[in-house]
Amino acid sequence: MMGGVKGARRFLLNVLFPVRCLSCAAYDTYLCDRCARAAERASLRCPVCGEVSFYGARHTGCGKARRGLTGFVSIWRYRGPVRKAIHAVKYSKISDAVRELVRRACDVMERDALRYEPFLQFARGAVFTYVPMRIRAEDARGFNQTRLITEKLSRYIGAPICDMLCKVKNISSQTLLSGARERIKNVHDAFAVRDGAAVPARIVIIDDVWTSGATMKSCARVLRAGGAREVWGFTLTQAV
């Protein structure tokens, strides 16, 4: 009986509020095939110097980041259909669209296994965590879209999740800051390992958008200081 009530409710919601592509308004999907094909792919870059790295691994010569990110991968440029979809998740609270975005991202990685397999191999033996939101922003939104991305991606890869990080001070939104120095200063000492959280040797840290990388790099330094030997970053999109 309960299943019948839930099914009827779902049917009614689909009639009243049908799922539509957040870019072109096509029915039955938040990101349709045509818009997914039109989304511009991101380059894989060294997380230290920002230059191209085929697998996304840190360049051997960028040794100053021994306490930072080991590598970083992203799927799309933060523009066009994907930007509209992520914007709708964050600012129109369409959290259900995260499932579609992650599914599309996983399709990209499967089709381009040559580039993404090193990351996927690492991720299969790692623990997933995510960038915590600003406290007031999460309270206002009601969810952390990055945690939702982490949950969906971890199921695809088969990796466990741990809430390792917390914010220890409120910071300004990185989107309001223009320069890299401002962004780095803004997140300096903003994160810490949660009390009682065990820091494993291999970690994948997840966010929705990579802009300057200041936030994820700050989180990675905290995790490395807490005992992690290798930390890879993953974002759906890249704004650079």
Image (tube, rainbow, N blue to C red):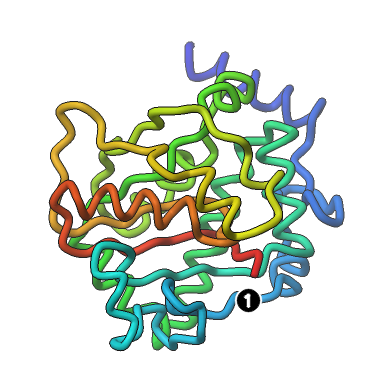
- The part of the image, by quadrant, that contains residue 120 is bottom left
For the point 35% across and 78% down, which residue is it? 58
Which quadrant is the C terminus positioned in?
Answer: bottom right
Q: Position of residue 178 (x, y in %)?
A: 71, 55
Q: What element carries label 1?
A: loop
> Left or right of 237: which side holds 188?
left
Identify which residue, 42 or 39, lies in the foreground.
42
Up/down of 189 relative to 64, above or below: above
Task: Say what amino acid the circle numbered 1 marks.
Answer: Arg
Q: Is residue 58 above or below residue 79?
A: below
Quarter where residue 33 is shown:
bottom right
Residue 237: horizontal and vertical position, in percent? 59, 62
Crowd rating for badge 1 (residues with CA inside 10 Å; few <14, some 14–19, many 20+): some
Q: Left or right? Give the position of 7 relative to 190.
A: right
User: In the picture shown, does residue 140 fall above or below 172?
Assistant: above
Q: In this view, does 90 lie to the left or right of 63?
A: right
User: Measured from the top left, where is residue 50 in percent x and y?
Assistant: 51, 78
- Report x, y in % for residue 182: 60, 51
Please name the residue that numbered disc 1 is placed on: 41
Report the residue at 54% width, 28% height from top.
143
Q: Nearer the viewer, residue 2 or 52?
A: 52
Residue furthest to the right in view is 24
Instruction: Please give the name of the residue rendered at 41% of the width and 69% of the height, measured from the top-left corner.
Output: 72
Q: Residue shown at 53%/64% (left/top)? A: 105
